Image (cartoon, helix red, strand yellow):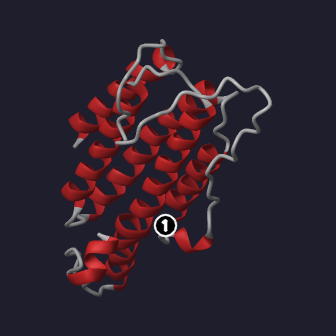
C-alpha cells in the first residue's frame, strides 16, 4: 500500500508543477472519453457557467478528519476556474495525495476488509487525472468545465458509496457489531457500487 501511494505521489508531483499549462499539441480525444472542442474566436460570446457542486452534510462518512478533508476537496474543486487552474490543480493534487494517505491509513489500521479494493479505486483515479492532465490541448473554459465535472462526479460517487461504506463499517466495528462490506448486488449495486 505504501509503495502504491508513493507512486501516486510521484506521478502527481511530477506532473502538476511543470506541466499543468500544456503546450498546444493537438490530441483527438481527452482522457475522460470526451472530445475537447476549441473555443470559438468570438470575443462577444458569453462563457458558459462551470459545473460545480458544493459540499452537503449528506456526504459525511462520520469520521471527522476525513469529512473535513472531503469538505476541503469540494471547496478546491469549486474554486477551479480558467484564471487559477494551474495553481488550484497543484494545490488540489497535493491535497488529494494527503487525503488518500490519511484515508488509507485509517482503513489499514482498522483492518477494513475492503481496503485493497478501495486502494485500487484511488489508484484508478490517480491514473485518470494524470492522463487527463497530460492532454496537451491548453486550458479553455470548456476544458476547465470538463475537469470540474469529472472531479465532482468522482468525488460524489466515490464518497457516497465507498467512503460512506467504510464510515458505516467502522462505526459498526466500534460498536462491536459486524457489518458485511461486500458490494451490493442487483440494480442498487450496479448504480451505487
Asked if residue 115 is positioned above or below residue 94 in the image, the reply reads below
Secondary structure at badge 1 equals loop
Q: Is residue 49 left or right of residue 31?
A: right
Residue nearest the observer in this picture, 116 or 18: 18
Residue furthest toward the bottom? 177
Residue 19 drawn at (x, y percent): 46, 17
Quadrant location of the C terminus in the rendered image: bottom left
Q: Residues within 10 Å of mark 1 (few under 14, many from 20)?
A: some
Q: Is residue 118 left or right of residue 86?
A: left
Residue 3 drawn at (x, y percent): 22, 34
Asked if residue 11 is positioned above or below residue 23 in the image, the reply reads below
Q: At 53% across and 69% down in the image, what residue appears? A: 59
Residue nearest the observer in this picture, 73 or 115: 73
Residue 106 drawn at (x, y percent): 36, 57
Asked if residue 124 is positioned above or below residue 162 in the image, the reply reads above
Residue 159 drawn at (x, y percent): 44, 63
Say how many tags the image has. Answer: 1
The image quarter in which residue 139 lies: top right
Q: Is residue 95 left or right of residue 120?
A: right
Quadrant location of the N terminus in the rendered image: top left
Q: At 48% across and 61% down in the image, what residue appears? A: 156
Q: Which residue is mark 1?
A: 63
Asked if residue 21 is positioned above or below residue 107 in the image, the reply reads above
Q: At 61% across and 72% down in the image, what residue appears? A: 57
Q: At 43% across and 54% down in the image, what residue appears? A: 154
Amino acid at each position: 500500500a505504501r509503495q502504491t501511494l508513493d507512486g501516486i505521489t510521484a506521478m502527481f508531483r511530477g506532473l502538476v508543477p511543470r506541466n499543468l499549462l500544456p503546450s498546444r499539441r493537438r490530441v483527438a480525444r481527452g482522457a475522460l472519453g470526451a472530445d475537447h472542442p476549441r473555443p470559438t474566436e468570438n470575443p462577444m460570446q458569453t462563457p458558459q457557467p462551470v459545473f460545480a457542486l458544493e459540499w452537503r452534510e449528506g456526504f459525511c462518512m462520520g469520521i471527522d478528519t476525513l469529512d473535513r478533508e472531503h469538505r476541503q476537496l469540494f471547496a478546491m474543486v469549486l474554486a477551479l476556474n480558467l484564471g487559477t487552474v494551474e495553481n488550484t490543480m497543484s494545490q488540489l493534487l497535493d491535497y488529494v495525495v494527503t487525503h488518500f494517505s490519511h484515508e488509507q491509513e485509517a482503513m489499514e489500521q482498522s483492518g477494513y476488509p475492503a481496503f485493497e479494493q478501495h486502494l485500487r479505486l484511488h489508484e484508478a483515479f490517480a491514473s485518470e487525472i494524470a492522463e487527463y492532465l497530460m492532454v496537451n490541448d491548453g486550458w479553455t473554459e470548456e476544458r476547465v468545465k470538463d475537469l470540474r465535472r469529472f472531479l465532482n462526479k468522482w468525488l460524489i460517487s466515490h464518497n457516497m458509496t465507498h467512503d460512506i461504506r467504510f464510515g458505516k463499517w467502522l462505526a459498526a466495528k466500534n460498536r462491536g457489531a459486524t457489518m458485511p462490506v461486500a458490494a451490493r448486488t442487483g440494480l442498487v449495486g450496479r448504480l451505487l457500487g
